Amino acid sequence: MTTTETTMTEVQEKQPRYGVSGRTIADRASGGEPVEQRWQFSTQWEMLELADGSLFFDSVYADHRVVASPPPVLRRILRMIDEDNPSLVAVARKVAPGGDRATVEQVERLLDPFFRAGILVPVRSDDRPEWADDELVERFSTQLEWLGSLSAESRGHWDYFGRLRRAHVAILGLGGAGSLLAQALTAVGVGRLTLVDGDTIESSNLVRQIFYHPDQIGLGKVDSMAEQLRRFSPYTRYDVMPEYIRGADDVSRCIEGADFVAVCADAPRFVLNRWIDTACKAGRVPYLGAFSGAVGPMYRPGKPGCFGCLEHRFRSELGDRHDLLVDALAAKTSWRYPSFVSGPLAVAQLMTTEIVMHLTEAAEPSCAGNVIRFQHPHTVPEPIAAHPDCDCSTEVG
């Protein structure tokens, strides 16, 4: 076998789009994988052989790659992987007599760009955990495929999914974003949800709180949502707390035992965020919320970027007027924002992905140290530096 340099358009240089692109994001450890490991094309990618002789790698995320003039040996190897999912040793034995170690290393170098781009991934292990019965595997089969595409390990999909199954998320507020988020986190298999909201369903809610029904008007949101979620999935445990939050102590009680807190409530305005920030920092519980047309930043104990950093920045911009403004917002108990269903949908989608990335540890959340602003037609991350007067990045672990 002759050593050939693989040239793939932008395979190394191209940066992923906003958020998680769906492809493997961790580099394959150099020399760390046993050569007996079998390989397959990621379910996020499809190899197409075009009439001009090029190889086109079609991504479901429109993140395409091209090899314009593939050497015959590369084309042959990729066809083998597409058909049989062989190991590098098996590939070497087919492309060169004997398939010695030097040939294996040449195959490995030839395929390295495909490993790094996440086009080729380890064949996922069929050995399921004891807790994964046939019904659960069937229910979450496509999600397991997706989780597998984010991992460089053959059992990565089970590791990630196991973390979701063990996770406990408290959702504060079941309005537009909160009700959608509760449904989404149930759909991904989070093991336990605590639902907190003292409100009842009103007719005007239905324009954006789309999982409630007209025949539920006047009923409590948490009980109505829990009833629906129990019908939707038996794989999540639901704790309901039909109450309003009136201080940091209430927050601490509502999030007890939670691994993560999703902030979807909005009253009393701004003061509620202070209470949550205080309680979560005291309990060292990560949290994420939406605030003023944005999602984030995500608070993670001992790391920079949190609501406190934002407030310090606001105070430095507004001076004494900041606290006067907060007092006025909190005192006003009746207001109505203009609303459209796409707003809560966008917030819930972003929060779901960010929470899943944090809980699985599959990738760094985009809201870690950032605020994601969604202002049509642009959605952009805005870095939030740790404020020197905030203690979020100096907490003792």
Image: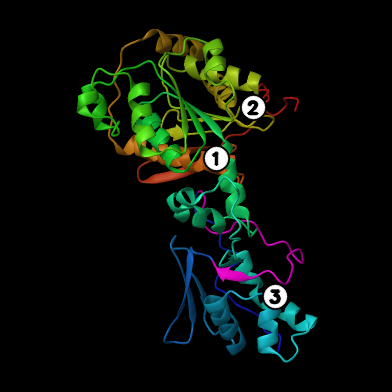
Q: Quadrant of residue 198?
A: top left
Residue positioned 67% across, 84% down in the render: 4
Residue 278 in view of the camera: yes
Who comes first in sequence, dot 1 or dot 3? 3
Image check: 302 left or right of 296?
A: right
C-beta proximity under 8 Å, tags 1 and 3: no
Answer whether residue 24 is magenta in the image: yes
Disc 1: which residue: 165
Q: Amino acid at mark 1?
A: Arg
Mark 3 secondary-structure assignment: helix
Disc 3: which residue: 108
- Dot label at residue 387: 2
Viewer-proximal residue, 193 or 133? 133
Rendered view: 317 above or below 144? above
Who comes first in sequence, dot 3 or dot 2? 3
Residue positioned 58% across, 34% down in the render: 384
Who comes first in sequence, dot 1 or dot 2? 1
Residue positioned 40% across, 30% down in the render: 178
Name, please, the residue furthest toward the right.
Answer: 101
Q: Amino acid at mark 3?
A: Glu
Image check: 169 left or right of 209?
A: right
Within 10 angstroms of label 3, few (less than 14), some, or many (20 or more) residues?
many
Answer whether residue 102 is magenta in the image: no
Quarter of the image that includes the N terminus? bottom right
Rendered view: 300 above or below 85? above
Q: Amino acid at mark 2?
A: His
Magenta region: which residues?
Answer: 19-41
Q: How is the image coloured?
A: rainbow
